[in-house]
Amino acid sequence: MKATTTMNKEQAGAKEEEGGVSASQLIDARINELGDWRGETLARVRTLIRQADPDVVEEWKWRGVPVWSHAGIICTGETYKQVVKLTFAKGASLEDPSSLFNASLEGNTRRAIDLHEGDTLDENALKTLILAAVALNTSRRAKP
């Protein structure tokens, strides 16, 4: 019965964490805890990710990092004092025609978008990048 409950939560886009608290609830708490531009930015990015991919699964990993997945990690949403960082797990393999990636550009795998207070985000370009990451994840998963 427990496996069914967890599967239903995963299908709803929120993996259950220890203690019965879902990742979505932990992300809600992080947004509220921040209470400033970083919380607002994280909430906005989260909304855009969910709009782009309604089947996205929210996870809470590495002692407090929001993670969005679909057939593998799409991106993480880390918050620091000066920046909200969206790190795309396979960003180096993604087309970025709008040049959203502005951090971790030297690596062979990941790419990141650093959002600072007052930055304007191209929301349509972010949604396109999310969909490209999902397409990459699902295409790799389909291979034997």
Image: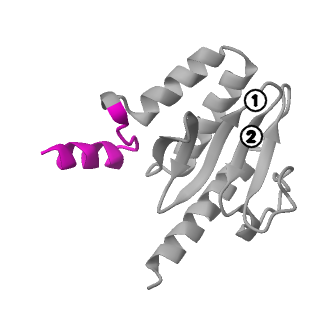
Q: Which residue is mark 1?
A: 80
Q: Compared with residue 76, is residue 98 higher up or lower down, i.e. above or below?
A: below
- In this picture, residue 103 sits left or right of residue 124: right
Let me know if residue 51 appears in the view: no
Graded by Cα atoms within 10 Å as few (under 14), some (14 to 19) or many (20 or more), the crowding at tag 2 reads many
Which residue is pictured at 59% across the width and 55% down the height?
A: 74
Under circle 2, the secondary element is: strand
Query: Viewed as shown, does residue 67 lie left or right of 95?
Result: left
Indicate yes or no whether the magenta region holds residue 139. no
Tell which residue pokes out farthest to the left in this image.
Answer: 1
Residue 138 in view (yes/no): yes
Q: Are marks 1 and 2 in contact (CB under 8 Å)?
A: yes
Across and down, in percent, residue 51 comes to 54, 44
Instruction: Measuring from the top left, give residue 30's x and y in whole percent.
Output: 57, 23
Amino acid tagged 1 = Tyr
Which residue shows up at 65% across the image and 51% down it? 127
Quick check: 82 above or below 60?
A: above
**Residue 16 falls inside the magenta stretch:** yes
Percent position of residue 79, x then y? 70, 31
- Report the magenta residues as a range: 1-18
**Label number found at residue 136:** none
Examine the image and state in which quarter residue 12 appears.
top left
Amino acid type at mark 2: Lys
Q: Residue furthest bottom?
A: 144
The C terminus, quarter of image:
bottom left
Furthest-front residue in this view: 63
Depth check, front residue: 57 or 109: 109
Q: Earlier in the sequence, mark 1 or mark 2?
A: 1
According to the picture, the residue beneath numbered tag 2 turns out to be 85
